[in-house]
Image (cartoon, rainbow, N blue to C red):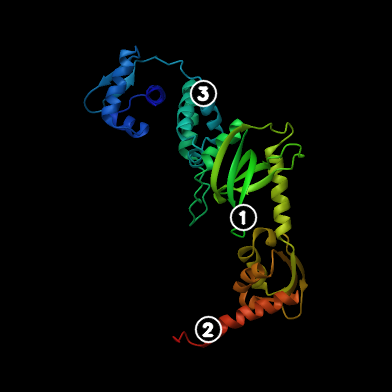
């Protein structure tokens, strides 16, 4: 909107001092011609903008002038929770609100504090995306966030972990960004006369369709998003790590546990005393036999599974099949 752009231009000049038309155009994501028109409009409205030509020129405000138009809109206030996280803010549809809200906040600060805030922003950056990964597409994140803000029921088509599709009517209570993955904590909408059910967790990237019903719901007064998320996350991790393996590790194998195993498996590892053959017994808790085969096979001869027998058999078969391929010398069939 032009009004937002004019205010952004004014606050940029107030916060940064002299700026060229090219610099303003880059910041505002518009053309230099648009900057020319906007500065003329601000001047006609009584804002004392000076245009200085030549080398070192640009636009600046008359010395001492400060705007008082720094009140935050609701969207800008919401967006300040994501200061330093422009990626998540953009995904939620709050990118422009975040930029303008930050400018307003800086404009309201005394000079020394504003300088410290800008210096911190230039020295620290948060990137939530893991290496060699791109965040999953979440086309319904912004409308879902709006439904969370407004406490409105949504209908979604959801892909479960086994790739089956289900239709759900949900009361979305909160959004969580875990690493670079978005989750929504939502309560299945109770039917008339039905008791309320506890909230469940859904991965936003698995939502294939979303309809905002426009129907409001009442949020539970005692709902604590951080506490509910932490409890669910701990229960989820504990429920996944149920296979307890008894193994023998060489000295090198013990050193590889925190490198090749999951952080939870490494943190819960229990080690026994050193044996005569230079190995030590250990108990490693992991998710399942297939996951354990995936985690333990890179150890090679530095690990030997003793129990459970089904894991020992599966890992032995996996390594024998791999060795057979190499013994074949890579010959084409």
User: Residue 178: in sight, yes or no?
Assistant: no
> Callout 3: helix, strand or loop?
loop
Sequence order check: which comes first, mark 3 or mark 1?
A: 3
Across and down, in percent, residue 182 comes to: 57, 46
x, y percent for residue 280: 74, 73
Q: Nearer the viewer, mark 3 or mark 1?
A: 1
User: Does 170 appear above or below 233?
Assistant: above
Q: Say what secondary structure mark 2 lies in.
A: helix
- Mark 2 and mark 1: span between their CA atoms? 36 Å
Q: Which residue is mark 2?
A: 325
Against 50, residue 284 (above or below) is: below
Quickly name the residue at label 1: 160
The answer to whether mark 2 and mark 3 are in CB contact below 8 A is: no
Q: Earlier in the sequence, mark 2 or mark 3?
A: 3
Rendered residue at 61%/32% (across/down): 215
Relative to 225, is 295 above or below? below
The quadrant holding residue 41 is top left
| Mark 3 vs mark 1, CA separation in Å | 38 Å
Name the image quarter holding the C terminus: bottom left
Check disc 3: other Cα within 10 Å, few if <14, some if 14-19, many if 20+. Answer: few
Query: Residue 14: x, y in percent?
Result: 40, 22
Label annotation for residue 137: none
Q: Which mark is residue 73?
A: 3
């Amino acid at each position: 909107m032009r009004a937002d752009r004019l205010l952004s231009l004014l606050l940029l000049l107030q916060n940064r001092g002299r700026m060229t038309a090219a610099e303003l155009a880059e910041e505002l994501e518009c053309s230099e011609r648009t900057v020319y028109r906007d500065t003329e409009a601000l001047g006609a409205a009584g804002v004392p903008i000076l245009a200085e030509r030549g080398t070192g020129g640009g636009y600046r405000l008359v010395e001492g002038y400060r705007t008082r138009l720094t009140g935050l809109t609701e969207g800008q206030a919401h967006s300040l929770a994501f200061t330093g996280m422009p990626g998540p803010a953009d995904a939620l549809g709050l990118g422009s609100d975040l930029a303008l809200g930050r400018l307003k906040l800086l404009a309201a600060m005394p000079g020394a504090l504003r300088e410290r805030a800008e210096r911190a922003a230039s020295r620290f950056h948060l990137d939530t995306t893991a290496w060699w990964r791109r965040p999953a597409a979440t086309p319904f994140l912004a409308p879902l966030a709006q439904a969370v803000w407004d406490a409105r029921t949504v209908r979604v088509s959801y892909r479960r972990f086994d790739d089956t599709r289900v239709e759900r009517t949900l009361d979305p209570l909160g959004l969580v960004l875990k690493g670079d993955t978005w989750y929504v904590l939502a309560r299945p909408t109770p039917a008339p006369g039905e008791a309320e059910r506890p909230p469940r967790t859904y991965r936003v990237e698995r939502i294939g369709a979303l309809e905002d019903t426009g129907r409001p719901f009442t949020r539970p007064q005692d709902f604590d998003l951080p506490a509910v998320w932490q409890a669910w996350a701990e229960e989820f991790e504990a429920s996944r790590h149920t296979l307890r393996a008894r193994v023998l590790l060489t000295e090198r194998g013990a050193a590889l546990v925190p490198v090749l195993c999951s952080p939870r498996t490494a943190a819960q590892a229990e080690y026994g005393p050193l044996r005569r053959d230079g190995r030590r017994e250990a108990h490693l808790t992991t998710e399942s036999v297939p996951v354990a085969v995936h985690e333990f096979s890179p150890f090679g001869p530095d690990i030997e599974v003793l129990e459970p027998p089904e894991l020992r058999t599966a890992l032995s078969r996996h390594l024998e099949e791999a060795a057979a391929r190499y013994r074949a010398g890579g010959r084409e069939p």
